[in-house]
Amino acid sequence: MENSKEDRCLVIVNPNSGSRKGEKDWEPITKLLVQNGIVFDNIFTEHKNHAIKLSQEAVLNGYRKIIVVGGDGTMNEVINGVFLQDEIPTNEIRIGMIPVGTGNDWGRMYGISNNYEEAIQILKNDKSFIQDAGRITYKNHTLHTRYFVNMAGMGYDALVAQKTNTMKEKGKGGAFAYLINLFLGLIQYKFNHMMVAIDGEQKYNGKVFSISVGICKYNGGGMMQLPNAVPDNGEFDITLIKKASKFKVITNIKNLYDGSFVKIPEVEMFTGKKIEIVSRPKHSVFLEADGESLGHSPIEFAIIPKSVCLITNKTF
């Protein structure tokens, strides 16, 4: 490859993102990158979690800028690859995004447009913002660790994500699929008993509908689950929805999009750096992070302050 890799960026393309928009739109995206003077190499993912390996190898091979052409799941994989290498501090690897996914909730936080020309203009401007990341420890037969940059959900949120991911695998994903599963999931959902401790202090012990833990505000294709989140303040935001009637859930779904659902009595909000969640029965609470279905309780979250360097025009 010509020139130093530190002067080039690696574009990691998920061809399956956005019902294969990643593949179909790669040619016009390539032309726009070239027209805007962005020097790059590119590689396509071939299977789930492939971007983890690709981004890890990219850093070890000298790249210091990675562009994601995909959705929130691809971004999550790239972040995990960056964190899995230990040669270069994670906040020295600059990460940008051209959204082609269906939810694009991380990009929504930063005003990164679904319009390719506008997204590439942000890359051309080349301004940086350093946000926090989260580390999750959870069970899936054995103990696992995963990193995330947007939001994790447990309880009902994880069920909806799992059902939506199953539809995606059959080529029927998208924000509309998520909305459908919000309703369908209510039929089979059973309330979980959870003990929640934040920074070493027990905050809740009882039946829970869902818990959201995150760094940014949106998930599920624009739902503002964490309306007060600030991505670089060194703390998680937590929204806990206690047991509520399913009718009340349905009538408040529209309020998820502007964050006003937090006003109902069943909602409690917290902030903290370390979160522990234990369920009863022991493994009954499932987990998703950045839309990816992972494993189950017991679950621990730890904040990693100012650890992800993003290419974005927006600051907070």
Image: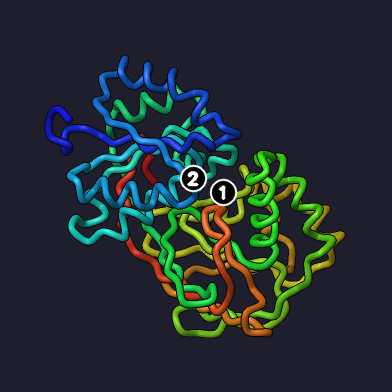
Which residue in the protein does label 2 denote? 106
**Where residue 208 sits in the image (x, y, percent)?**
70, 73
> What is the basis of the colouring in this image?
rainbow
Disc 1/disc 2 C-alpha distance (Å): 7 Å
Q: What crowding class fits label 2: few (fewer than 14 Cα within 10 Å), some (14-19), or many (20 or more)?
A: many
Please tell me whether mark 2 sits on a helix, a strand or a loop: helix
Establish if 78 lies above or below 68: below
Question: Measuring 51% from the left and 78% from the top, which residue is drawn there?
Answer: 276
Q: Is residue 199 above or below residue 47?
A: below
Q: Is residue 184 left or right of residue 115?
A: right
Q: Do the residues under discs 1 and 2 have CB atoms within 8 angstroms?
A: yes
**Numbered circle sitting on residue 68:** none
Q: Which of the 4 image quadrants contains residue 304?
A: bottom left
- Identify residue for label 1: 218
Q: Position of residue 81 (x, y in %)?
A: 34, 54
Q: Is residue 275 visible?
A: no
22 or 202: nearer the viewer:
22
Callout 2 amino acid: Trp
Q: Amino acid at mark 1?
A: Tyr
Q: Residues within 10 Å of mark 1 (few under 14, many from 20)?
A: many
Image check: 242 left or right of 216?
A: right
Residue 288 in the image, given as x and y percentages of width and height: 57, 61
Q: Secondary structure at mark 1?
A: strand
- Residue extending furthest toward the front: 46
Q: Quadrant of the N terminus?
A: top left
Direction right: furthest residue: 247
Residue at coordinates 12% horizontally, 34% vertically from top-left? 4
